[in-house]
Amino acid sequence: MRTVHVSLGNRSYAIEIAPGLLDRLGRECARRNLGPRCAIITDTNVGKRYAKTVFNSLATAGFSPSLIIVQPGEAAKSLKTVLSCYDQLAVHRLERKSFIVALGGGVVGDLAGFLAATYLRGIAFVQVPTTLLAQVDSSVGGKVGVNLKAGKNLVGAFYQPRLVACDLDTLKTLPDREFRAGLAEVIKYGIIYDAKLFAQVERDLPKLLKRELRMLAAVVARCCKIKAEVVGRDETEGGPRAILNFGHTIGHAIEAVSGYGRFLHGEAIAIGQVAAAKISRRVLGLPERDVERITRLFRRAGLPTTVRLRAAQRPRLFATMRLDKKVRGGEIKFVLARKIGSVVWGQRVPDELIHQALDGCVNRKS
């Protein structure tokens, strides 16, 4: 088993990466002195495969688990779903010393983490990510929240889990589209932090797409270590943690204006990262060969690098970007790359350059 530590003082926790962790989850939770009662939050798709295993593991370890199932997809990250889950947590009599288990992908992790942060003013929670995207990114770092019609993740909190358990066996049953979407975050870590990781993904992409266990374990651990290092320096995104948002300002806006569900998160941020690379070339002088490498790798991974939008959606895209959490004084701030493996945050970009980058990424449709 590989273990990555997130160092945050008394909020520190471990990320465990190995096959077979679902069966051992109850024992791992018992080691952390979590309360006797817990609720498993999952969606209908993941629940069919893994809820029974997790439920039995927790029960065997002496916990009293209950199961709450939500609908799959980004639409579940809503205040309506939150209210429904609050009522169920109350019915199941969760107390201040109870805990929540987030069993699923990024949507379930964000939703369950937000519930844990707010129910009874905060109870413990455990992340059990079952998608590649969640294992390498969204389950780590404590950003939890839900969406509004105006934009993604506009209601949320910084709230750290007590444990992240990445069972690599869950990636075996992940649909191909979901797996490829997770690679968008893996590629991002190479762009923002680790040129060697980027080159490794370029070289070993066929092995990753075949989901070879040793390769997956190494890549998931490296991504988690990068995020742990960044979060350890800047837990609440006051500065350097913003580099994790490379490609996300445009990507989140694409998700919103195209209707949540059309694009998976990883697909939208793949487009956003290509656009950010094009902007980086104009603003910071990112070499053209790096822009080409970035674009080519996303395409090889089977991810989109362009999107079709109606003409009326372009103004909505900009309006949504201006609602982004990283906007300051009404001005959109970007994370941009100097070279693969090195980025800077808080960059002002004229609207004209954003339009020009989008012209290369957006296929207009009247």
Image (cartoon, rainbow, N blue to C red):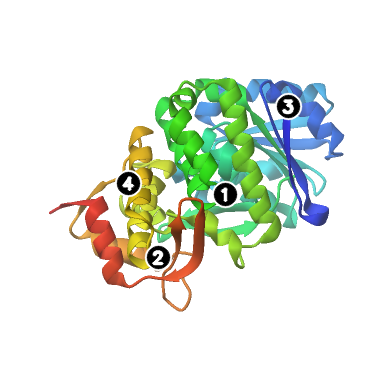
- Of the residues under marks 1 and 4, which one precedes in the sequence? 1
Q: Position of residue 77 (x, y in %)?
A: 50, 47
- Of the residues under marks 3 and 1, which one precedes in the sequence? 3
Say which mark, if any, is on residue 1.
3
Instruction: Write down the residue under mark 2.
Output: 284
SS of the residue under disc 4: helix
Residue at the location (45% across, 44% down)? 74
| Quarter of the rendering occupied by the C terminus | bottom left
- Of the residues under marks 2 and 4, which one precedes in the sequence? 2
**Alpha carbon separation for disc pair 3 and 2:** 41 Å
- Estimate how packed mark 4 is, as few (under 14), some (14 to 19) or many (20 or more) residues with alpha carbons within 10 Å: few
SS of the residue under disc 3: loop
Say which mark, if any, is on residue 110.
none
Kind of residue at disc 2: Leu
For this rendering, which residue is in front, 141 or 320?
A: 141
Kind of residue at disc 1: Val
For this rendering, which residue is in front, 116 or 231?
A: 231
SS of the residue under disc 2: loop
Residue at the location (41% across, 75% down)? 331
Kind of residue at disc 3: Met
Residue lying furthest left in this view? 366
Res 72 seen here: no
SS of the residue under disc 1: helix
- Of the residues under marks 1 and 2, which one precedes in the sequence? 1
- Of the residues under marks 3 and 4, which one precedes in the sequence? 3
- Estimate how packed mark 1 is, as few (under 14), some (14 to 19) or many (20 or more) residues with alpha carbons within 10 Å: many
**Alpha carbon separation for disc pair 1 and 4:** 42 Å
Instruction: Write down the residue under mark 1.
Output: 82
Q: Position of residue 47 (x, y in %)?
A: 57, 26
The reply to whether the C-beta atoms of the residues labelled 2 and 4 are less than 8 Å apart is: no
- Of the residues under marks 3 and 2, which one precedes in the sequence? 3
The image shows residue 128, relative to residue 322, as above or below, that is above
